[in-house]
Image (cartoon, grey):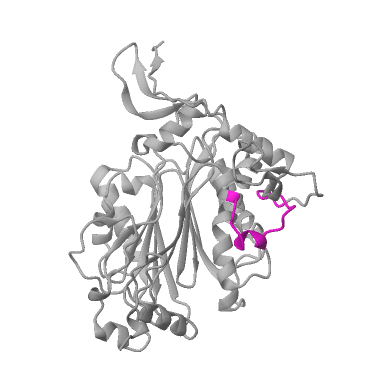
């Protein structure tokens, strides 16, 4: 007999059995939000690393944390800001980014709509924070790895080389952030050079290039950051965003600055945390990183455990999974045991990818297809939320070629200052790119 419960959800390419998906929907109605336990550790060399840990943050901008807020009205926010050329950009971003992101999310949304709106709001919040910081006339910059946990959904926005990884309850490891070091990202090298920047290594008195690839002018090793006003607008604040949904078995996040990742691999860092609570795990990672390479840079780590309610210790991991999973794997049905699918509301340890985008183009990042795009007010600036009269805004698609299928009259729209920011970030947009070597002659 035909059994529809044996069908797989192949329409979306997930490979998750329909029975599991239906059970998940039924269970989500009665499974509580996870318990969030966190800890941090830091060894300071320059005093330019800053953290943000808000286990309960209200969704309304400006209200901050509060124990009186109901669980349904709160999210958890964790972030690392790794500054350079001084702490000003890291401090400013720590104080303003959260509110700028939350202010970009329309009010009165359902839970599903809020989740769908968050990636665009993160892009808007990062760009607005960078744009506002430029008025401070400070020359510092900062990397940002910004994590929002809403129930079992984890969303990570990142610029720079601080990283965030997830270890699921089963022991699979997932990278949730991007590395915007020019040495590690050929696509970003092409984008920077196409926008008018030069990319090359330091060359002293005509010798071979030394050190990492840098962007010139300025000599920054990163292609994305907040701040760095003296480097050039082609160093953009547009974040890579990845959004995933955990099973209700939970998992562990490790968020750390490059002081950790220059010394430890993802797997090494996780191995050092086995069986430790979050605070002790963060301290162990920082200790091992400093022991390995010495204290050459600010070294900061946040560990966040996302646990089933009332399970106040890290989940036991199975060893030997091997490798970092960058593309999210959905299991075929033959990997699911009868016990897993029939044991109440227990879910198989499947991490679902809900969203991922890393383009630096605002036209692509702010545009949302129907019906999600209708959540946002058409004539509010898509970056700074300035309310504009019809006809005042400039479409993010204003420079699209005539044969494009995108309707420039349909928005999203930008105010004049945010449009100027967009044009500056896109730079010359040359059709060809090249790498160069920068000559430095000692005095």
- Pinpoint residue 338: horizontal percent, then vertical percent: 25, 85
The quadrant of the rendering that contains the C terminus is top left
Residue 46 visible in the snapshot: yes
Q: Is residue 309 visible?
A: no
Q: Residue 221 appears at what percent x and percent y?
A: 41, 33
What is the x, y in percent for residue 374?
Answer: 66, 61
Residue that appears at 66% across and 47% down: 407
Residue 411 in the image: state x and y as whole percent: 68, 49
> 168 above or below 327?
below
Residue at the farthest left position: 320
Name the residue: 48% across, 78% down. 33
Task: Report the span colored magenta.
Answer: 366-385
Query: Quadrant of the rendered structure where residue 376 is?
Result: bottom right
Figure quadrant of residue 229: top right
- Residue at image location 35% in from the left, 79% down from the top: 347
Residue 21 magenta: no
Magenta stretch prevailing secondary structure: loop
């Amino acid at each position: 007999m035909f059994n529809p419960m044996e069908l797989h959800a192949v329409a979306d390419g997930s490979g998750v059995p329909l029975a599991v998906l239906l059970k998940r929907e039924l269970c989500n109605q009665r499974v509580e939000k996870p318990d969030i336990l966190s800890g941090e550790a830091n060894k300071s060399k320059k005093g330019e690393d800053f953290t943000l840990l808000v286990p309960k943050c209200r969704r309304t901008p400006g209200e901050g944390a509060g124990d009186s807020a109901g669980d349904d009205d709160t999210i958890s926010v964790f972030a690392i800001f790794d500054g350079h050329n001084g702490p000003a950009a890291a401090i400013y971003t720590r104080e303003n980014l959260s509110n700028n992101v939350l202010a970009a999310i329309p009010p009165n949304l359902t839970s599903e709509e809020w989740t769908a709106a968050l990636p665009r709001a993160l892009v808007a919040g990062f760009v607005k924070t960078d744009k506002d910081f430029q008025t401070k006339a400070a020359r510092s910059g900062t990397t940002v790895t910004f994590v929002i946990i809403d129930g079992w959904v984890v969303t990570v926005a990142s610029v720079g080389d601080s990283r965030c990884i997830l270890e699921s309850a089963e022991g699979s490891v997932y990278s949730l952030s991007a590395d915007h070091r020019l040495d590690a990202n050929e696509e970003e090298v092409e984008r920077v050079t196409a926008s008018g920047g030069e990319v090359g290594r330091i060359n002293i008195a005509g010798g071979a290039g030394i050190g990492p690839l840098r962007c010139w002018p300025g000599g920054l090793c990163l292609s994305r950051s907040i701040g760095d006003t003296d480097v050039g607008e082609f160093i953009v604040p547009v974040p890579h965003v990845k959004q995933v949904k955990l099973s209700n078995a939970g998992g562990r996040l490790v968020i750390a600055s490059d002081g950790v990742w220059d010394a430890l691999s993802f797997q090494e860092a996780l191995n050092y945390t086995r069986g430790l609570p979050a605070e002790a795990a963060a301290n162990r990672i920082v200790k091992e990183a400093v022991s390995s390479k010495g204290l050459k840079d600010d070294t900061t780590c946040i560990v966040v455990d996302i646990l089933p309610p009332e399970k106040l210790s890290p989940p036991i991991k199975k060893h030997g999974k091997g490798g970092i999973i960058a593309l999210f794997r959905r299991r075929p049905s033959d990997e699911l045991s009868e016990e897993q699918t029939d044991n109440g509301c227990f879910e198989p340890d499947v991490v679902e990818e809900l969203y991922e985008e890393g383009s630096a183009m605002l036209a692509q990042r702010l545009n949302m297809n129907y019906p999600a795009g209708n959540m946002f007010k058409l004539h509010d600036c898509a970056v700074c939320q300035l309310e504009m009269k019809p006809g005042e805004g400039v479409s993010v698609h204003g420079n699209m070629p005539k044969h494009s299928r995108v309707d420039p009259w349909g928005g999203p729209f930008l105010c004049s200052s945010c449009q100027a920011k967009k044009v500056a970030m896109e730079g010359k947009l040359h059709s060809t790119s090249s790498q160069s070597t920068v000559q430095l002659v000692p005095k």
